Image (tube, coloured by chain):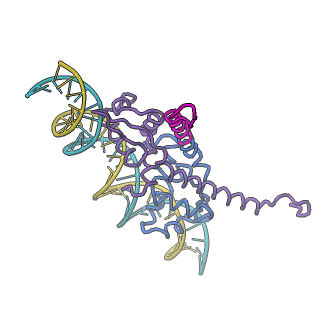
Chain colours: A purple, B blue, C yellow, D cyan
Amino acid sequence: MVVSVMDAAAHAVAEPTRREILHLVRDTERTASDIAGHFDVTRPAISQHLGVLREAGLVTVRADGRKRLYRARPEGLTELRRWLDDFWRTSLRNLKVEVERDHPPTDPRSGE
Amino acid sequence: MVVSVMDAAAHAVAEPTRREILHLVRDTERTASDIAGHFDVTRPAISQHLGVLREAGLVTVRADGRKRLYRARPEGLTELRRWLDDFWRTSLRNLKVEVERDHPPTDPRSGE
DNA sequence: AGGAAGCGTTAGACATCGCTTACACATTGT
DNA sequence: ACAATGTGTAAGCGATGTCTAACGCTTCCT
């Protein structure tokens, strides 16, 4: 089962439909049925996707009468972003060190 | 089924064991059994995780005799990173615009 | 040649995912 | 009170994911 915050965020984002949903509610609040209207799948399917996004902290919900207004919550991506950035940066830094060890900056005297 | 590069990368990274594997091969090449030695699950399970990581382009393999040397391939994370960064930045930018519209920067003449 | 070492692959069990259909529940409008 | 609207939830189904046990293929060593 999905456990950590990162697992939840990465898992949520790995689904194309959910990424599209995120884009839909990135700049505007939208109702559940408005969102569902953009897809071919049934409304309950979207409702379930919204549940996954909400539990992952990637969207917020606000009740307004019988409507439920969804909106993206970018902070939910923080941990995932940081993990990726850390991994990426450390990895490339080490690659660089390695390359420079194997192919040192050209020194005329080394005669490579 | 997983289709795009992003789907594959995000899906691969959503698994805690696979993230640990990535860390193990981030700075050093490691053999499959070396990697498997760090986990409680059986070696075939790890071999399958390595398969997922390889198909997602997150690791490279190099055969050396009967050994298979794995190593992280950070470029495999590029698309995912860019999507996250774009989403994050655009989202926050719009939030800022909105806040400033609802609570304009204090102007003495506006008498808020 | 023959055994051991290092790995991948397959088959099967079991959980989880993404979907649909059907239903339940609250809010709004008459 | 009653119907319509907007939505979540439950049940069930096929597909996919993760694991183990068993097997097969190379490569190395004697």
Q: Position of residue B85 (x, y in %)?
A: 57, 43
- Can residue B60 be seen here? The reply is no
From the viewer's side, name the closer residue of A14 and A77. A77
- Can residue A102 be seen here? The reply is yes
Q: Position of residue A79 (x, y in %)?
A: 50, 53
How many numbered circles does the render carry? 0
Vertical comparison of B41 with A32: above or below: below
From the viewer's side, name the closer residue of B38 and B48. B38
In the rendered image, the residue lying farthest to the right is A109
Q: For residue B15, which quarter of the picture?
A: bottom left
State the quadrant of the N terminus of chain B.
top left
Vertical comparison of A74 with A6: above or below: above
Residue B89 belongs to magenta span:
yes
Residue B101 belongs to magenta span:
yes
Q: For residue A103, which quarter of the picture?
A: bottom right
Task: Tell me which segment is drawn in magenta.
Answer: B88-112
Q: Position of residue B55 (x, y in %)?
A: 52, 49
Left or right: residue B77 versus residue A47 is: right
Q: Name the residue rendered at 41%, 33% in the picture.
A: A29
Q: Name the residue rendered at 49%, 67% in the picture.
A: B36
Q: Name the residue rendered at 49%, 44% in the picture.
A: A74
From the viewer's side, name the closer residue of B32 and B13. B13
